[in-house]
Amino acid sequence: MSDIKVLVLVGSLRAASVNRQLAELAAETAPDGVTLRLFDRLGELPFYNEDIDNDAEHGGVAEPVEALRRAAAEADAALVITPEYNGSIPGVLKNAIDWLSRPFGTGALQGKPLAVIGAALGRYGGVWAHDETRKSFGVAGPRVVEGLQLSVPSAVFDGKHPRENAEVAANLRDIVGKLAAEVG
């Protein structure tokens, strides 16, 4: 593996979110030759509106949308790290999926490998949100790598950074390595 770029999208906007900490840990423990780049502007994306997306003569899409699509186009793969909100996908992440799915069939992540992981309250660690996120991205165009899954109950961390949990750190490093191996 050499010079593989992985786009990281975090479904939580909170600065101290466990999922953001998982993104930090993934970047810290990535195998040699793999670089993770967090797109930290999901909160700036306007709600998806096809009229705006198709209206190039009036300025087209907002700059944060262009930046997201550019970051996705430059990436070789994507890692989505998300909590579960009310049993499903956080709205900010679903909105990003909608922007990335266009133009339909040729979106910036089309055919690229993608994995979904994360942590959430409750004993299942966000499994429902992770499954729904995989489904939505699968329709949107990336190649979802189903075997790469990690859903961690946030209570496991007991208020500590995920890097202090050796098992989670090892699993995360393994997932990033396997995701990078899917590039090609």
Image (cartoon, grey):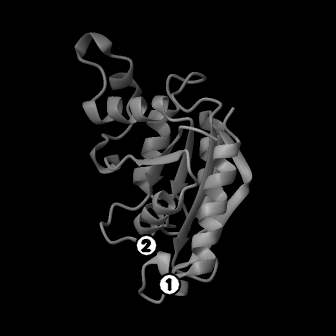
Image mark for residue 26: none
Please determine whether, in this image, residue 102 is positioned above or below residue 169. above
Are the residues tagged 1 and 2 within 8 Å (C-beta)?
yes
The quarter in which the C terminus is drawn is top right
Kindly report the distance in space between the C-alpha atoms of the residues bearing marks 1 and 2. Answer: 9 Å
Q: Tell me which residue sits at (52%, 74%) in the image.
A: 120
Which residue carries the number 1 mark? 157
Residue 174 place in picture, x, y as percent: 66, 61
Residue 14 place in picture, x, y as percent: 32, 66
- The answer, for residue 125, to whether it is visible in the render is no
Which residue carries the number 2 mark? 18
Q: Tell me which residue sits at (38%, 36%) in the image.
A: 68
Where on the picture, by quarter, is residue 12?
A: bottom left
Where on the picture, by quarter, is residue 30?
A: bottom right
Q: Tell me which residue sits at (35%, 41%) in the image.
A: 47
Q: How many marks?
A: 2
Residue 74 place in picture, x, y as percent: 46, 30
Q: Tell me which residue sits at (71%, 47%) in the image.
A: 145
The quarter in which the N terminus is drawn is top right
Q: Residue furthest right?
A: 147
- Secondary element under disc 1, as helix, strand or loop, is helix
Residue 59 place in picture, x, y as percent: 24, 17
**Circle 1 residues within 10 Å: few <14, some 14–19, many ≥20:** some
Q: Residue furthest top?
A: 57
* 45 sits left or right of 92 in the view: left
Nearest to the observer: residue 102 or residue 110: 110
- Secondary element under disc 2, as helix, strand or loop, is helix
Residue type at mark 2 is Val
